[in-house]
Amino acid sequence: VQLQASGGGSVQAGGSLRLTCAASGLTFSSGTVGWFRQAPGKEREFVAVRRWQFSTTYYKDSVKGRFTLSRDDAKNTVFLQMNSLKPEDTATYYCAATPTNLISSEQRNDFRYDYWGQGTQVTVSS
């Protein structure tokens, strides 16, 4: 199983980026997919997670209304559309997946995920 994350870059505050996570050896149509991020000197944190079977998506409070997690089944790819970016969104972003349908109390825990992409850097300047 491989997850390939891409789409990061440098933008000014208020700008947008769309991150892409392409999977091989794993189908996103089942299980749980998440996006996490890690800023320098900080722990990795949950950003967004979706259990496809139940069509539920959860977002970190600070990104609600600005970030959207979606997928393209034909390409076995998930996206994180990030709008109205803020300097505090600066981090390395990781996609993660597990074939398990994680319950809500587990979804935010990065150790619950079996597969990880390599990370893509997002830098937002003020």
Image: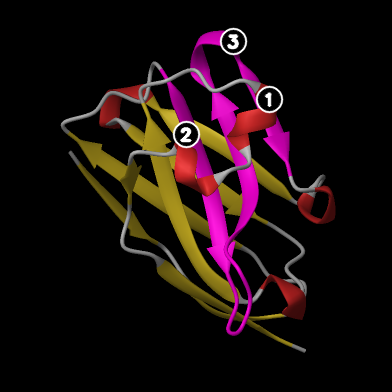
Q: Which residue is mark 3?
A: 54
Give the spatial CA distance, label 1 vs label 3: 11 Å
N-terminal label among 2 and 1? 2
Q: Which residue is mark 2?
A: 33
> Looking at the image, which is closer to me, 8 or 46?
46
Q: Please tell me whether mark 2 sits on a helix, a strand or a loop.
A: strand
Give the spatial CA distance, label 2 vs label 1: 13 Å
As shown in the figure, which amino acid type bears the numbered disc 3?
Answer: Phe
Query: On residue 104, which mark appears?
Result: 1
Q: Please tell me whether mark 3 sits on a helix, a strand or a loop.
A: helix
Percent position of residue 45, x then y: 63, 58
> Looking at the image, which is closer to me, 101 or 112?
112
Label 2 Cα crowd, 10 Å radius (few <14 / some 14-19 / many 20+): many
Q: Considering the image in quadrants, where does the N terminus appear?
A: top left
Percent position of residue 73, x then y: 35, 23
Mark 1 or mark 3, which is nearer to you?
Answer: 1
User: Which portion, as a residue range, is magenta?
Assistant: 31-59
Q: Is residue 35 inside the magenta stretch?
A: yes
Q: Please tell me whether mark 1 sits on a helix, a strand or a loop.
A: helix
As shown in the figure, which amino acid type bears the numbered disc 2?
Answer: Val
